[in-house]
Image (spheres, grey):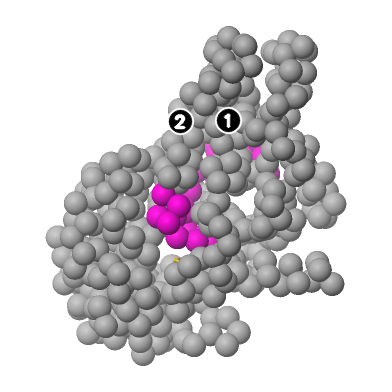
Amino acid sequence: MSNKQLNDFMPGGNMTDNKKNFIGMDIEQIKQEMVMIGEKPFRAKQIYLWIYSKGAKSIDDMTDLSKSLREKLHRNYCVSRPYITNHQVSKDGTQKWLLKYKDGNEAEMVFIPEYDRGTLCVSSQVGCTLTCKFCHTGTQKLVRNLEISEITGQVIIARDMLEGWQLNGEKRKLTNIVFMGMGEPLYNTDNIISSLKILTDKNGIAISKRKITVSTSGVADQLERLGSETNASLAISLHAPDDETRTKIMPINKKYNLDILMDICRKYPEISNTNRITWEYVMLKGVNDTNEHAKLLAKLIKGIPSKVNLIPFNPWDNSPYECSEPEQIQNFAKILLKNKIPAPIRKTRGEDIMAACGQLKSESERIGKWQKK
Ligand code: SF4
């Protein structure tokens, strides 16, 4: 699809609108809006279904509202999706979209199809403050948090593009969501929690809570709130089993060290063998990948229902690390398995379009520079 076609795809997405966007509002907020403009609150349910269940792209699509009401709504409201500025498809089927928001800022989202599911990796911020040393996204400065409309807007666009809204008995392609794109979700907790409520509402987008995973670098003081208010599945970017190594590669460990982090993770609600904590572990040659590290890791998470995702490092230009040897990654996995901890080695996806883990900055900046030429 050309960029021109992509841009034409966004009929509700007038980026210059100063109107209130229905996308990002929950049912109660839409009810309040209806009362404010002198309409009956039950209109909210109709509008809500159009937005989140039928995928309306414009107020004009809401054909069970009278023409006069649609005209009235047009004066104050819009149905505005983020603007797609680039779309790439990897040879392995992974897709990446670069999305532009109302103020011109951009963030990326990635769709990873697998035989039994399809996972959308969404962004929570433009840029990131956390400077994890192995992550290219972390070399881009934080610009701002994404709003609720911008977070839910990513999922809405993915549904538009991947499968449509009304299915004739076919299975949905988009089944899972992970907050693992750009940014630290728990530095944007309010908007993440509100977005999760919209995404999981059975009357709307209806993605199961268990199929949504929030991945954090370990903002321990927000974890309790995330667990109690959303029940989302939890992934922790751990990447090292001891404070010394972790602080070197993840500066956030100075603030929330492993004692603090482990203590709060042990209390995360509804953790069980069917709902394990996922520990993300990027394999960096000579840094965190020895047999000793694997044994320490098994000891650290002992007693917590866990799965460790071993991620072969995806290098970028001038990156300070190399990926561990395949044989050492296997050794590492075996030690964890011996300790009854599942440790799948993640297959790198979307590498040819820079959509793999931790690569999400460079392409948007590269395209940005190219577009400014
Ligand atoms: S790994 Fe996540 S938290 Fe760390 S710098 Fe990258 S985007 Fe930020």
Placement of 236 over or under 288, stated as above or below: above
Residue at (31, 78) in percent of width and height: 246
- Name the residue type under label 2: Asp
- Name the residue type under label 1: Tyr
Q: Which residue is mark 2?
A: 201
Quarter of the image holding residue 248? bottom left
Q: In the rendered view, does 58 fall on the left or right side of 111?
A: right
Instruction: Please report the bounds of the magenta region as a residue range.
Output: 160-189
Count the marks: how many?
Answer: 2
Residue 320: x %, y % from top left: 49, 88
Which of the two labelled residues, at mark 1 and mark 2, occupies the earlier sequence position?
1
Asked whether 80 falls inside the magenta stretch, the response is: no
Mark 1 residue crowding within 10 angstroms, few (<14) / some (14–19) / many (20+): many
Visible residue check, residue 184: yes
> Which of the pair 136/118 is nearer the observer?
136
Mark 2 residue crowding within 10 angstroms, few (<14) / some (14–19) / many (20+): some
Q: Which residue is mark 1?
A: 52
Residue 191: x %, y % from top left: 47, 45
Residue at (74, 18) in percent of width and height: 72
Residue at (70, 26) in percent of width and height: 76
Residue 59: x %, y % from top left: 72, 25
| Magenta stretch prevailing secondary structure | loop
Please give the label number shown on residue 263.
none
Label 2: element kind: loop
Mark 1: is the Cβ under 8 angstroms from ligand 1? no
Label 1: element kind: helix
Q: Are marks 1 and 2 in contact (CB under 8 Å)?
A: yes
Asked whether 165 falls inside the magenta stretch, the response is: yes
> Which of the pair 123/172 is nearer the observer?
123
Placement of 248 over or under 162, stated as above or below: below
Residue 174: x %, y % from top left: 55, 44
